[in-house]
Image (cartoon, rainbow, N blue to C red):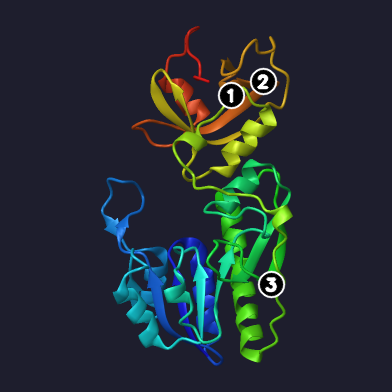
Amino acid sequence: MRIIFMGTPDFAVPSLKAIVAESNDFELVLVVTGSDKPRRNKHSAPEPSPVKQAAAALGLPVYETDDVKSQEFVDKVTAARADVIVVAAFRILPPAVYEKAAFGAFNLHASLLPAYRGAAPINWAVINGERETGVTTFFLQQRVDTGNIILQEKLLIDPEENATALTLRLSVIGACVVVDTLHLIASRHVVISSQDESLASRAPKLTRDNTRIVWSHSVKAVSDFIRGLSLRPAAWTTFKGKTMKIFKAAPAVFLLLPLPTSSGMIAVDKGRLYASCIDGWLEVLILQMEGRKPMDAGEFLRGFRLDGESRFFV
């Protein structure tokens, strides 16, 4: 069975490798990924995507594009004569592309659809304090993330797990589900199920606005918010007029006195840094000040003078 694989980030790499490992059954005829661009930060040199790097190491043909609607791309997909197109963390494909596969095109999505449709399902699941998530394969159709479900696999979320660690675990089980889905398609034994629209929820793209910490929320909500955005893009706040990213925090393990009189206050106790939420204190563990490298709170406190006017801005 001839396969085109489309993906860009680290999340897609295990699926790519899993398909290659099944070379007796599947022929990977083309890998499609995004073009080289700065990936560590906007000022870094352009780098190949993780999928491009993996494909090159495996000796696979790679096609790069940022315009999935171009005629050149449509022609490239057509010429590959694919039986199946596998999509894992790529762009939204038009019908002119995904309808070129003889047996269909399916996507690997990092949620239990119809929950968390959208660009950032892993982040929002953690932000919202979910205890369970998973992966879904589904056939593509015009409305994004709404196609008929092929397979799902559930996974428990550890209460202290951040989005980066969860992404890694989901990518591994996702690779197994991708291979199982391909075997079902090849054997013509696919049993699909439609998505229940009444259970649908959204996982919108992460922006500067929706990644800012709101200190007037509960300790648990702020802690989950920070976990859900760590390590990238990272939850942020401001301190003395500069951006501070917070990568790790946890509810205070003991009661600080006095109780906070407002949200966003700072307290320091025995070399440890705390910030107040609506219902108590959150300990800040790892942070990064604008223009500096990430550091633990102890190092931050040794290098910055805190005074009675210092506070996070709500």
Residue that protrudes farthest toward the bottom in the picture: 24
Q: Residue at x 31, y 64 (%)?
A: 35
Mark 3: few/some/many CA within 10 Å (<14, 14-19, 20+) = many
| Displayed quadrant of residue 256 | top right
8 or 71, which is in the foreground? 71
Circle on res. 215: 1
Tell me whether the residue at label 3 lies in contact with that at label 1, contact meaning CB atoms closer than 8 angstroms.
no
The answer to whether residue 66 is above or below residue 259 is: below
For the residue marked with disc 2, what is the amino acid?
A: Ile
Mark 2: few/some/many CA within 10 Å (<14, 14-19, 20+) = some
Q: Residue at x 59, y 22 (%)?
A: 274
For the residue marked with disc 1, what is the amino acid?
A: Trp
Location of mark 3 (residue): 151
Circle on res. 278: 2
| Displayed quadrant of residue 180 | bottom right
Tell me whether the residue at label 2 lies in contact with that at label 1, contact meaning CB atoms closer than 8 angstroms.
yes
Q: Earlier in the sequence, mark 2 or mark 1?
A: 1
Q: Is residue 36 shown left or right of residue 190?
A: left
- Camera sees residue 86: yes
- Locate residue 153, reporting x and y percent: 70, 66
For the residue marked with disc 3, what is the amino acid?
A: Leu
| 3D distance between C-alphas at marks 2 and 3 | 41 Å
